[in-house]
Image (cartoon, rainbow, N blue to C red):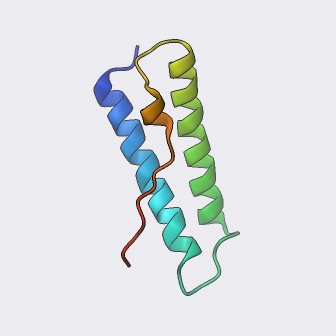
Amino acid sequence: MLTRGDITTLTKTRERVQELERKIEHGTRDFTQGRLAEACQACDAAILQVLILARVHDLGVTDADMRLTTRIDAA
C-alpha cells in the first residue's frame, strides 16, 4: 500500500519532470525532441502508470493525484 507521503513524493516528482520539459519546450534552443525531453516524457508516463495502477487497486490514490500539473513557468 502506498502511503500519503509516497503519493505526494510521486506527484511532486511528476510536477518537476513536467516543469523541466516545459523549460525545454520554451527555451531558446530546440531540444524538444532530444534525449532529455524523451527522458522527461518517459518518467512522467511511468509515474502516471504507477498512480493509475495504485488507483485501480484502491491503494489511496485520488483522481486529483493523477491530474497533469497546470503550473506555468514565470521564466
Residue 35 sits above or below residue 57 on the image: below
Say whether residue 74 is left or right of residue 47.
Answer: left
What is the x, y in percent for residue 56? 57, 16
Say whether residue 30 is left or right of residue 65.
Answer: right
Q: Which residue is at 53% across, 38% downward? A: 47
Total marks shown come to 0
Which image quadrant is residue 49 in? top right
Residue 54 sits above or below residue 35 on the image: above
Quadrant of image for the C terminus: bottom left
Task: Point out the residue furthest to the left here.
Answer: 5
Task: Point out the residue furthest to the right here.
Answer: 33
- Compare residues 35 and 74 and report the one nearer the observer: 74
Quadrant of image for the N terminus: top left
Residue 40 sits above or below residue 51 on the image: below
Residue 57 sits above or below residue 61 on the image: above
Say whether residue 41 is left or right of residue 63.
Answer: right
Q: Which residue is at 56% across, 47% downward? A: 43
- Compare residues 67 and 32 and report the one nearer the observer: 67
What is the x, y in percent for residue 57? 54, 12
Q: Which residue is at 54% across, 77% downward? A: 26
What is the x, y in percent for residue 30? 65, 81
Q: Which residue is at 46% across, 47% downward? A: 14
